[in-house]
């Protein structure tokens, strides 16, 4: 009995370590400054290795329901005790091959990733972002200044104007039009991390 408990604990630790090493970015940060339009959602099978955006915290080692929850869920999926195809599909948004979680389902996705991130799939309801990015927005002066800084560095071209407003909690709103940009990662909160994520799923161009 003690040996079985040690084996189970070791499997749990290895499982969680695999999840901690997988790339992940906050979905909110990924699409931070984009004013997004999407196509109607479609239910389809999605490769979990392309799902790189999750809710906060940005990690696949989820412990909000206990340290064993995702591991135990994965074992039930593996044994067939749980059939994910019979469950309500998680809602994802896809942009240039990178998927972000927009609604409940991150624990199931993490479980499948922990079992086989390279080949695992999950049935999901997917809305595709309309290309290209044409509108942006932000709710703080600090973020507006950051977008202006990126524009000055040649990362995007277009216009951005801000105004005081009482209709939103921050008291400020800035919106703009995009004529051209270096890539969708330009409008992420953490630009460098977002670029790494897009590079993982976007084939290099010659």
Image (cartoon, rainbow, N blue to C red):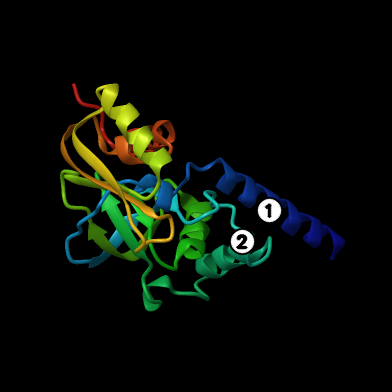
Looking at the image, which residue is at 36% across and 61% down?
Answer: 166
Relative vertical location of residue 153 with respect to residue 72 in this rendering, above or below: above
Residue 2 falls left or right of residue 108: right
| Relative vertical location of residue 204 with respect to residue 75 in this rendering, above or below | above
- Horizontal placement of 202 versus 159: left or right? right
Name the foreground residue: 24 vs 163. Answer: 163
Q: Identify residue for label 1.
A: 11
Q: Is residue 161 visible?
A: yes
Q: CA distance from mark 2 to mark 1?
A: 9 Å
Asked whether residue 200 appears in the rendered view, the answer is: no
Total labels: the figure holds 2
Residue 71 placement: quadrant: bottom right
Q: Which residue is mark 2?
A: 71
Q: Residue furthest right?
A: 2
Residue in the foreground of this view, choosing between 26 and 77: 26
SS at circle 2: helix
- Asked which secondary structure carries label 1, the reply is helix
The C terminus - image quarter: top left
Is residue 24 shown left or right of residue 173? right
Q: Are marks 2 and 1 in contact (CB under 8 Å)?
A: yes
Q: Earlier in the sequence, mark 2 or mark 1?
A: 1
> Which residue is more in the foreground, 134 or 173?
173
| Residue situated in front as seen by the camera: 96 or 38 | 38
Q: Bin the neighbour count of mark 2 within 10 Å (Cα to Cα): few under 14, some 14-19, many 20 and up.
A: many
Image mark for residue 151: none
Q: Identify the residue at image location x=30%, y=61%.
A: 45
Tell me the residue at 78%/61% (across/down).
4
- Image quadrant occupied by the N terminus: bottom right
């Amino acid at each position: 009995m003690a040996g079985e408990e040690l084996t189970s604990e070791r499997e749990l630790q290895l499982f969680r370590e695999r999840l901690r090493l997988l790339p992940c970015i906050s979905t909110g940060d990924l699409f931070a400054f984009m004013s997004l339009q999407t196509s109607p959602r479609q239910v389809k099978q999605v490769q979990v290795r392309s799902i790189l955006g999750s809710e906060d915290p940005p990690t696949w080692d989820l412990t909000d329901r206990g340290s064993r929850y995702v591991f135990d869920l994965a074992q039930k999926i593996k044994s067939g005790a749980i059939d994910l195809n019979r469950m309500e599909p998680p809602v994802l948004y896809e942009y240039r091959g990178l998927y972000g979680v927009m609604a409940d389902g991150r624990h199931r996705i993490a479980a499948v990733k922990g079992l086989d991130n390279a080949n695992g799939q999950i049935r999901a309801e997917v809305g595709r972002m309309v290309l290209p990015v044409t509108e942006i927005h932000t709710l703080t002066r600090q973020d507006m200044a950051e977008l202006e800084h990126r524009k000055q560095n040649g990362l995007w071209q277009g216009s951005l104007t801000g105004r005081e407003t009482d209709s939103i909690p921050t008291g400020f709103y800035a919106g703009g039009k995009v004529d051209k940009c270096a890539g969708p990662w330009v409008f992420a909160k953490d630009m460098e991390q977002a670029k790494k994520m897009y590079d993982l799923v976007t084939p290099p161009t010659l």
